[in-house]
Image (cartoon, rainbow, N blue to C red):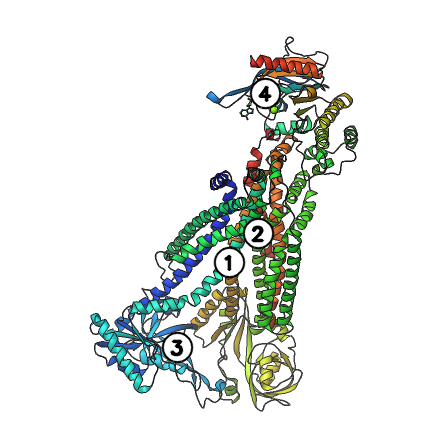
Amino acid sequence: MIRLTLSQMRRSAGRLAAAGLAIVIGTAFVAITLLAGNVITRTTYDSIAAQFTGADLVVRGVPADDAALDAVRGTDGVATADPQLMTYQQLEAGGRTIYQGVLAEPTDTSVLPLEVADGSLPEASGEIALPTDVAERLDAAPGDTITLVRNVLEGDQSSEEDAWTEVREQLTVSGTLTDPYGAYSMQGGAAVAPAADVAGWEDDLAAPGEEPVAPTTMLVTLDDPAGVEQARTAITGALTNGAAASGADTADLKVVTPEEHAEAVASEMTGGENVMFTLFVLVFAAVALLVAALVIANTFQVLVAQRTRTLALLRCVGADKGQLRRSVLFEAAVLGLLSSAVGLVAGVGLGQAALTIGRGMDLGVPLPATVTITPAVVLIPLAVGTLVTLVAALSPARAATRVAPLEALRPADAPSAARGAGRVRLVLSILVSVIGFALLGGGVALSTVGQEPTTGLLLAVAGGGLSFVGVLVGSVFWLPRVVALAGRLVGMSGPTARLAAANTLRNPRRTAATSTALLIGVTLVGMMSTGAASARVTMDSELDSRYPVDVTVSTDLSSDPTSVAAGDAVVAPVPAALAGTVSDVSGVSRVVEARATAATVTGDGVDEGLAVTVRGVTPDDAASVLRSTEMVEPLAPGTVVVPEEVSENWDITDGQALTLTGPDGTLDVTAAVTDLADTGMIVVPDDLSSLDPDAPVTSLWVGLDDPSDATSVVPSIQDAVADTEAPADVMGAAVERAGFQQVIDTALGIVIGLLAAAVVIALIGVANTLSLSVIERRRESATLRAIGLSKGQLRGMLAVEGLLIALVGAVLGVLLGLVYGWAGAAAALGWAGTPVIVVPWRDVLVMLLVAAVAGLVASVAPARTAVKTSPVEALASE
Amino acid sequence: MDTTVYVPIPDEGTAARPTVTPAVRARALTKTYGRGEAQVRALDGVDVDFTAGRFTAIMGPSGSGKSTLMHLLAGLDSATSGQSFIGSTEVTGLNDKALTALRRTRVGFVFQQFNLLPMFTAEQNITLPVELAGGTVDRQWLGTLVDTLGLSKRLTHRPSELSGGQQQRVAIARALIAQPDVVFADEPTGNLDSRSGAEVLSFLRRSVRELGRTIIMVTHDPAAAAYADRVVLIADGKIAGDITDPTPESALAGLDALRTVASR
Ligand SMILES: Nc1ncnc2c1ncn2[C@@H]1O[C@H](COP(=O)(O)OP(=O)(O)O)[C@@H](O)[C@H]1O
Ligand SMILES: [Mg+2]
């Protein structure tokens, strides 16, 4: 029987190839995912190992506080001992801000894996050495000063809000550093400052009432690096004794070599982020494999149908059902194992290629030279690929056992359509779909109306998944109907199209399975892009009110209105030429000058002595730069626009009568509360003049041509402002907006990239189904040719068939994707305001186009085979 | 452009009748399969004429080259050498496009296995050639065909709902719908029981007698051949005899004569 199976496989090799290709792609995907996980682990190990490369021992598991440090330093054979301490601080220079990790300088600087490129390491308090790229961005060379901006707790610390004060300190750049081993590449590089400075900054970060947290890792160098083992015991002893005296916990204490430390950290990571990453990507691999399983199931179904006569003959000569089933399953196992092996090799090859290219591109992260092949990388893809193929062949194997011996005696004809699917399946699919969609609807309602986003989202996700399973299981019933409808429409265009439409309907199950494979991928892609588009628009309106002006250039941003009100400080005006300078920056569409003065507010129930910044802008000017004009719509003479936040803080209600008192006069106005995000109030310029005729221009409101260019335009504005040496700050709200959008776009890109594998496999499935059908319809193609079908018409017929199968899958997928995308966006973003429902037309169009082109392309090879069929074969009598 | 070549018809040795135009002619038609040792000469310099408006049977033992002759006459396969004509068109010189056009308008086929399209109804099957050619169906002619072939009650049925004889009658109607110059039928009764076979054969004869068609039928069955106006006998790829107005007995005798020649 095995010999027979193998010879049958050889005869069907071509037909099995496409199914095999589906498994190859799926398993390659799995292999690459596992390899990528290994690369992350490896990169982590390398970077940790590099961080500690200069140390002889690493002490971990106990706080590296002064007592512990003293104990270690006092141990025989120890040369130096330093805590490994890194603090993140905000550095500014020339209007640019960078958030940078700063490392405490060790006693023995040879421990540092960093190299001085220019200047030197810090020698005194107030100095800092910067990574070369950071120094470049801050435009700071050794000897220059930069600003360290910190928030420090002050006063009685009774209320957290009042206690934080911004502190600005000048630091001198002592030198620039390179990181040749990539030790801190995963942390965005490391600056170095004297240990005492760094410890002080870090301590100031502690929340009110909390003890600063001591670092948990200590770097130790030895007098004699060969004495590692003695030193290890001695340090352990010293720390345990010291701890015993103070009552500290040393259960986790470990004195290890740098290699051991790196290994421990990397393996800790393997249990955390790494697994999350791998699992995340494996979900997509699973989708790809599911689609591959459909393609395989389809192929075997067709093969069994085409071999009906042979199978019946075997039954006639005495084969029992079990033998036929085992024969099909054996065939599947061989195919699965072979394809998985090819997929594994392809995956490893691709992974290695990606790594080689990645190393060549200098990504800033030191990548390993070769992929790490662990037993898991080899065994999991092989096992999964073979298993998926076997499972996919189960139903065809059962079909094989149902072939009656009698069928050997029937005249050979094109295999008839598979028996209709069972009623159980129909009921099950309807039930699952209904429950799923109900849950989905409930989840959406819960998170939008019920404002229970977490439960709502969970419910929606569960419902979405369930309903999709129901829809897929039921596709055998409803998809052929859709194809029939589409076919009837297409069929009106002529006899070729009518032939094609009729052909897609003769094996409804096969057509359904093929379309379904594509439907899965397209639905998921459609869902993601719809969800992202809806999220983007919902975020946009949210961002519009949070960041109404793209960029603000002002001198009063950091000033506190309360101090202004005291009358002791009127903010510095923005230099008159600055507006022109800014509007000359390319990408800037409009600049509006806003004058401002300080005023006190009085009114019923308003907190006594409220001091605010009052700006004067004309309604037209405001509308021309604001992203959302609603926020200044009420602006008119006699009206003051009060930002929502200010109104809440000071108990001002919409429509309330207020009196503003400025340096040179008072003004009675009506409050109009809008959701403008600002710290000041806005009146028309004439009203402002009555408060203070000499109110200076303190801010420029800058509108950009395209806010998504903010990441490049805002730095240009910063440069332009810095060049004038005006004491103005540039606040790029648009940068944050662009940042949000970039996050969404990047996430979407990655997800769609991961889903692409499933779509590609499904398209292979379309080509496969067509070729199988063409093989099976040889005689029919010949007959058609004999009665006058031209070669072009035959090609056209197959093209329409491919188009029909692909487009039905794609159109339905897009529709389902829209529904799921909207539901998902509503469930996920219901808390952030009314979710906006968006159709991502461009993406939809691209998907349909890809499907259409792929459907056409899928028909090319089968058409070539079909056209080669001579009409003579119609007359051949088997 | 028509690639018509006129070849003088030799007066002697063939069954040419000067009063009627030959619908189909073969001149020195030769077909070999394979190469070297394995070469088979399926047709060996065949000269034959088929008269328009007649029902002709090609008869011979199995493997004698009947099907090959028909394929070459109909332009379904290419000749190794020699010429074949339908009317004044030299079929052996046409490219695929011209052959497709020829099959659409001037040739019809009836197959042993019926070869109807399972997903179409009887009527759709019948009218398919006209639609493929982009023409409009002559409803009157369709009515005549359907009546003559006794299919009026079966037009909406699919092939799977028809008996073998009915299917073959649908196939005959499909072959005649475009009013072709000639209809080729290869063993049209090979898959039918004798009663349905007889029925189909009388329909073929009626198509010739009442509708003025030309039919060339390949068969190895003397009883079937007896329905024809004339039998052309073929053996070892050569024309081996000619029987006018055959009866089952004369056809059988002709075939037997060939067999004895072959076995000698
Ligand atoms: N495609 C082919 N390849 C090789 N030999 C062929 C082919 N078709 C027919 N033959 C050979 O040509 C001869 C005539 O065949 P055919 O015309 O089919 O005979 P008939 O129809 O009279 O039974 C036979 O010997 C047959 O084996
Ligand atoms: Mg034959």
The residue tagged 3 is A147
- The answer to whether A77 appears left or right of B62 in the picture is left
| CA distance for labels 4 and 2 | 49 Å
- The answer to whether A692 appears left or right of B149 in the picture is left
In this view, the residue in front, A391 or A361, is: A391
Judged by depth in the image, the label closer to the viewer, 3 or 1, is: 1
Instruction: Please say if A563 is above or below A404.
Output: below
Instruction: Please say if A814 is above or below A825.
Output: above
The residue tagged 4 is B65
Residue at disc 4, CB closer than 8 Å to ligand 1: yes
Instruction: Identify the mark at residue A628; answer none if there is no mark.
Output: none
Q: Amino acid at mark 4?
A: Gly
The image quadrant of residue A687 is: bottom right
Label 1: chain letter: A
Mark closer to the chain start, 2 or 3: 3
Label 2: chain letter: A
What is the crowding at mark 1: few (fewer than 14 residues within 10 Å), some, or many (at least 20)?
A: many
The kind of secondary structure element at disc 1 is helix
Mark closer to the chain start, 2 or 1: 1
Label 4: chain letter: B
Mark closer to the chain start, 3 or 1: 3
The kind of secondary structure element at disc 2 is helix
Judged by depth in the image, the label closer to the viewer, 4 or 2, is: 4
Same chain shared by disc 2 and disc 1: yes
The kind of secondary structure element at disc 3 is strand
